[in-house]
Amino acid sequence: MKTKVFAALLLAIAPAAVAQSLAGLWDATITFNGQDIPFRLQISGDGSNLQGWLFNGDQKVVASGASFQNGSLVLNFDSYATKLEAKLEDGALVGQYGPMQKKTYPVKAHRNQASMFQGNASAPSIDGLWEVAVKNSKGEQAWRLIVQQKSAMDVSAAILRVDGDTGALTGSYKDGKFVLSHFSGGRPALMILTPSADGTLAVDLTDLHGKSQLTATRPDVARAKGLPPPTDPDRHTSVKDPSEPFRFSFPDLNGKIVSNTDRASKARWCW
């Protein structure tokens, strides 16, 4: 009789134990453009208190909803109109993420093993500002590449363009290369930086635009070579008549129409 009661208790607490077992940091990959792009996934709590989030550098991108039932995890990211769905199989989370660009992409995660970006103890310094030579339809001839290198194991970087940035790609140095990646619910990216003997960086980038092989140079070296600097974002956008007010009209979250004249009226009244 006691054996049966003990077995029944185990069955009763099993779902909670399984849910609790998801708590912690997971080393994940999303397969995008034929490339496995690493990212971090954090889960905390259980049951109705379950939470999950991705990372943009050190910044948390928290799921708007989370559930774990019958071995299936669902994390909703309403700001992207996407979700991560995965089943717990042999200790790993296996599933998909999407829709992103009208598709879903395979995702797999294992429990964190110290660091998913295990690297070498020492690395050459690439810290600071670089310029990446490009030619695109927006008229740019160079991007800014900003690298923050705290150690061989802790490196982050971001590319700045006139239309935005890549987000914070993080990673480490291993086997002669800096391997950095980013995925916070959108813009998956993998960037491999390889220092060259001439002082440049070979930049292999996989992102929403596909795969690119580029070269980064220090700004003073780029000027000495006569290479054009990155486009100033403030000068890239212009209007026909700067004195003309920006006019807009659209419904707010309650369906009420708001416009530039409404805002202006309120501003004058407040003054």
Image (cartoon, rainbow, N blue to C red):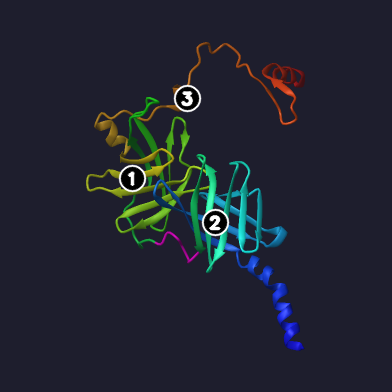
Question: Residue at horizontal 68%, vertical 62%?
Answer: 46
Q: Nearer the viewer, residue 256 or 264?
A: 256
Q: Amino acid at mark 2?
A: Leu
Q: Identify the residue position indicated by label 2 in the image.
A: 41
Q: Which amino acid, mark 1?
A: Asp
Q: CA distance from mark 1 to mark 3?
A: 28 Å
- Quick one: label 1 or label 3, which is nearer the N terminus? 1
**Which quarter of the image is occupied by the N terminus?**
bottom right
Which residue sits at x=48%, y=66%?
A: 113
Q: Which residue is mark 1?
A: 204
Looking at the picture, tell me which residue is in the foreground, 249 or 11: 11
Q: Amino acid at mark 3?
A: Asp
Tell me the crowding category of disc 1: few under 14, some 14 to 19, or many 20 or more residues within 10 angstroms, Cα based: some
Q: Is residue 185 visible from the viewing direction of this image?
A: no
Q: Residue at x 66, y 57 (%)?
A: 67
How far apart, in angstroms, are the residues tagged by discs 1 and 2?
A: 24 Å
Does residue 166 belong to the magenta stretch? no
**Is residue 252 placed above or below 113 in the rendered structure?**
above
Q: Which residue is mark 3?
A: 234
In the rendered structure, which segment of residues is drawn in magenta?
A: 112-118
Q: Whole-Å distance between the Cαs marked 2 and 3?
A: 36 Å
**Local crowd size for mark 2, using a 10 Å CA cut-off: few (<14), some (14–19), many (≥20):** many
